[in-house]
Image: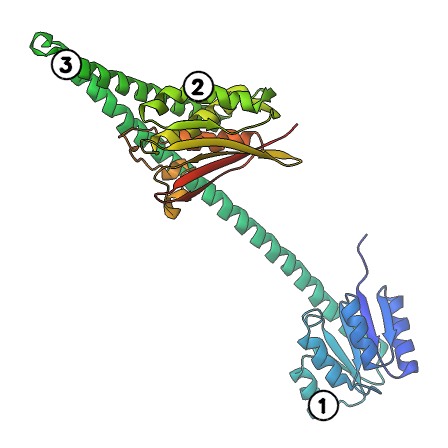
């Protein structure tokens, strides 16, 4: 059921206010009556009104001054004001319009005139309310369109980067394989040392290509929503130790110390493959950008709802500009490691997808030439 229009009558004349109030109530309007300007201002600020009938001649604050105050306050400036007055000369009427009144009704008023003018202005109010709702709806739809447009731009950037990876990153090692195959045709002319070097390079290219393809396939599964998500109860300290053992040889080749600083067992519900991928990618990234003789430490801190895992290194760091883009595929940045290691450019992107799949967050804090800490949170059971 639609709420009736609410009207405030501020009239010093008891007989006049009783008469106008009775007529308007009979017509289905909700009526409030006050006898002076101060009460009119207080009530108008306390309750929403659709229309105010205001007497010019008031005992404390003149009707013109009441109207000025109403029009200067953000809560009441939009309420239409109709003056009720015996002062219906041109000068008084012009003054009322200048300070914001929408109409005048001369006293003593006629029943038909009062009802007709009130009805007309309330129809204006109704139309304005409909326009305001439509404007709010348009603003909301415009915001939604902007958000959708931003998503489309992100998807386009992701698509462009995806094809760029396929066109360049996959092509490079394949070209190397063809070159290696050509060299094998002249195997007799290659010295043993050169052959061993070529085999090492061939293996590194194959490992890089395999890691790239695995990351591309995983990322594509995430975008299609087809990747399996199977949380189970896991011991975080043991998962960290497993990731460290897997990459210890890579670290030892650069004389980097890997330290598991988790002192207690932390139980959490997580997908095993995803958690291992997150830890492996963060450790691998830290090793890649940490110079020989550096240190990498993994630690964790818990609150009531989540655990925060931090992977800190003493590496070359990330600039503030690049730090804002490391988790976005559309802003893929490729940089060789401190020993010339190559990367797929998708490791941190996958970490972000997997962390958010668990309802967590991921971030990065870094200082160029002093090191980086990549952190992520996961909810506790």
- Mark 1 vs mark 2, CA separation in Å: 91 Å
**Which of 321 and 244 lies nearest the eye of the viewer?**
244
Residue at the image point whose x is 78% and y is 86% from the top: 62
Circle nearer the N terminus (1, 3)? 1
- Mark 2 vs mark 3, CA separation in Å: 31 Å
Disc 1, SS: helix
Q: Is residue 63 left or right of residue 129?
A: right
The residue carrying mark 3 is 193
Q: Are the residues at dot 1 and dot 2 in contact (C-beta closer than 8 Å)?
A: no
Disc 3, SS: helix
Circle nearer the N terminus (2, 3)? 3
Residue at the image point whose x is 54% and y is 50% from the top: 143
The residue carrying mark 1 is 92
Q: Are the residues at dot 2 and dot 3 in contact (C-beta closer than 8 Å)?
A: no
Residue 274's spot in the image, x, y percent? 50, 23
Residue 210's spot in the image, x, y percent? 34, 19
Residue at the image point whose x is 90% and y is 77% from the top: 19
- Front of the two marks 1 and 3: 3
Question: Is residue 212 something that shows in the picture?
Answer: no
The residue carrying mark 2 is 245
Q: Residue furthest top?
A: 188
Specify the quadrant that holds the C terminus.
Answer: top right
Residue at the image point whose x is 28% and y is 24% from the top: 170
Q: Is residue 150 above or below residue 66?
A: above
**Which of 2 and 176 lies nearest the eye of the viewer?**
176
Mark 1, other Cα within 10 Å: few <14 / some 14–19 / many ≥20: some
**Which of 39 and 267 lies nearest the eye of the viewer?**
267
Circle nearer the N terminus (1, 2)? 1
């Amino acid at each position: 059921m639609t709420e009736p229009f609410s009207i405030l009558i501020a009239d010093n004349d008891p007989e006049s206010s009783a008469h106008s109030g009775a007529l308007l109530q009979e017509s289905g309007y909700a009526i409030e009556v006050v006898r002076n300007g101060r009460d009119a201002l207080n009530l108008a600020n306390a309750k929403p009104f659709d229309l105010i009938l205001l007497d010019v001649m008031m005992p404390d604050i003149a009707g013109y001054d009441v109207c000025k105050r109403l029009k200067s306050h953000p809560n009441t400036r939009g309420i239409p004001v109709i003056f009720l007055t015996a002062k219906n000369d041109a000068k008084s009427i012009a003054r009322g319009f200048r300070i914001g009144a929408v109409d005048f009704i001369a006293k003593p008023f006629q029943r038909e005139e009062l009802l007709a003018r009130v009805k007309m202005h309330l129809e204006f109010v109704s139309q304005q309310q409909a326009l305001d709702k439509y404007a709010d709806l348009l603003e909301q739809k415009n915001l939604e369109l902007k958000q959708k447009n931003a998503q489309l731009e992100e998807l386009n950037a992701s698509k462009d980067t995806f094809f760029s990876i396929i066109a360049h990153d996959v092509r490079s090692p394949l070209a190397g394989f063809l070159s290696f195959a050509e060299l094998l045709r002249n195997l007799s002319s290659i010295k043993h040392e050169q052959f061993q070097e070529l085999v090492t390079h061939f293996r590194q290219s194959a490992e890089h290509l395999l890691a790239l393809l695995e990351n591309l396939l995983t990322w594509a599964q995430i975008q299609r929503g087809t990747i399996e998500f199977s949380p189970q109860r896991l011991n975080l300290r043991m998962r960290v130790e497993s990731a460290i053992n897997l990459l210890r040889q890579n670290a030892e080749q650069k004389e980097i110390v890997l330290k598991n600083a988790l002192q207690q067992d932390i139980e959490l519900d997580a997908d095993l493959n995803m958690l291992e991928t997150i830890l492996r990618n963060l450790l691998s990234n830290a090793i890649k950008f940490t110079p020989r003789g550096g240190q990498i430490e993994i630690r964790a801190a818990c609150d009531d709802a989540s655990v925060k895992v931090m992977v800190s290194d003493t590496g070359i760091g990330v600039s503030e500009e690049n730090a804002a883009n490391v988790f976005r595929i559309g802003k893929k940045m490729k940089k060789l490691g401190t020993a010339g290691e190559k990367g797929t450019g998708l490791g941190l992107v996958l970490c972000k997808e997997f962390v958010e799949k668990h309802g967590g967050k991921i971030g990065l804090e870094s200082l160029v030439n002093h090191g980086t800490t990549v952190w992520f949170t996961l909810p506790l059971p």
